[in-house]
Image: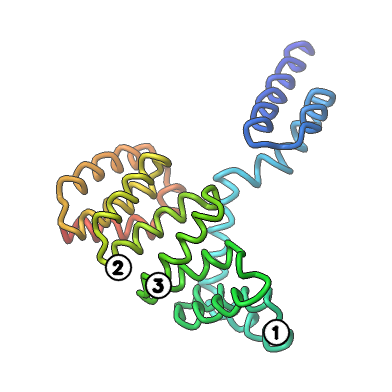
């Protein structure tokens, strides 16, 4: 029996070692995992694997959504207060993000642009925030400019998010052919539920019933395997998706 337990600990350590190699963790994790199979696996799970897992990301989303529901203006008030007290670039970034979350997209875009007029001019997180803000206030040309800057500077930076937002911005700017090409590239590269769903929503709105119907079948296959928790996490996207199919 002790040999069975030892073998199980080694298998678990081996699983986490493979994860460490694939995710580019430091090599000292391999030493820890195989020197202390049981304790090392527990530490790796808590320190690396769990924070990087979909479960953890989903839990954070649920907690954030609950906090926003209970006090929807708290973060905006605190961000305003922090910037008024100490008008640093970091506090202005926080304010811009809070404004965007609160639906004040134009003011958010203006604050993001102010952050870019200084040492943070090449900061890609700020550029992405600015592109989201400009997209939200339907100033698609500005959003495209920021997204193309991000892609030119670092093609790997939040690649799927940038690709989908660029496709949506191109569609908003009336560049339908470019939007279709970007959506198709996102689906081919990432193959995620979100990329297919956003492509289907655009296709339905554009009157491309053949593409939207094909994607609907693919999306349904994915949803048939979902549990209740996954469905709950994707509820906002599903609501938009269903509305698009109803208007088709």
Name which residue lies at 71% across and 80% down. Answer: 88
Q: Kindly give the residue lying farthest to the right in the view shown.
A: 35
Question: Number of callouts in the render?
Answer: 3
- Disc 1 is placed on an element classified as loop
- Please, what secondary structure does the residue beneath circle 2 have? loop
In this rendering, the answer to whether 175 lies above or below 159 is below
Mark nearest the camera among 2 and 1 is 2
The 10 Å Cα crowd at callout 1, few under 14, some 14 to 19, many 20 or more, is: few
Neighbor class of circle 2 (other Cα within 10 Å; few <14, some 14-19, many 20+) is: some
- Percent from the top left, x then y, of residue 34? 79, 23
At 65% from the left and 43% from the top, the residue drawn is 50
Q: Does any portion of residue 71 appear in the rendered image?
A: no
Cα distance, mark 3 to mark 1? 25 Å
> Which class describes the residues within 10 Å of circle 3: few (<14), some (14-19), or many (20+)?
some
Quadrant (top left/top right/bottom left/bottom right) for the N terminus: top right
Residue at the spot of label 2: 173
- Above or below, 61 relative to 74: above
Q: Residue furthest front?
A: 152
Does any portion of residue 81 appear in the rendered image?
yes
- Earlier in the chain: of badge 2 and badge 1, it is 1
Helix, strand or loop at label 3? It is helix
Upstream in sequence: badge 3 or badge 1? 1
Rendered image quadrant of residue 169: bottom left
Left or right position of 17 against 60? right
Left or right: 56, with 43 as reference point: left
Residue with the mark numbered 3: 136
Pick the residue in front: 75 or 148. 148
Pointer 1: what residue? 87
- Residue 117, image x, y percentages: 61, 77
């Amino acid at each position: 029996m002790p040999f069975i337990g030892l073998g199980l600990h080694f298998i678990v350590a081996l699983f986490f070692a493979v994860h460490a190699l694939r995710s580019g963790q430091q090599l000292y994790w391999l030493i820890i995992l195989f020197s202390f199979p049981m304790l090392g696996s527990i530490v790796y799970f808590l320190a690396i694997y769990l924070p990087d897992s979909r479960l953890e990301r989903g839990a954070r989303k649920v907690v954030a959504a609950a906090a926003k529901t209970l006090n929807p203006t708290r973060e905006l008030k605190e961000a305003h207060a922090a910037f008024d007290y100490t008008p640093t670039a970091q506090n202005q970034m926080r304010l811009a993000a809070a404004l965007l979350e609160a639906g004040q997209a134009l003011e958010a875009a203006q604050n993001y642009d102010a952050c870019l007029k200084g040492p943070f001019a090449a900061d890609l997180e700020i550029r992405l925030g600015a592109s989201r803000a400009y997209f939200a206030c339907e100033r698609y040309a500005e959003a495209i400019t920021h997204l193309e800057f991000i892609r030119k500077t670092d093609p790997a930076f939040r690649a799927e998010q940038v690709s989908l937002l660029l496709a949506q911005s191109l569609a908003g700017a009336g560049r339908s052919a470019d939007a279709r090409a970007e959506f198709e590239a996102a689906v081919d590269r990432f193959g995620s539920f979100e990329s297919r769903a956003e492509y289907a929503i655009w296709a339905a709105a554009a009157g491309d019933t053949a593409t939207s119907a094909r994607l609907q079948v693919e999306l349904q296959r994915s949803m048939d395997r979902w549990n209740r928790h996954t469905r709950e996490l994707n509820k906002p996207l599903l609501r938009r998706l269903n509305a698009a199919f109803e208007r088709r």
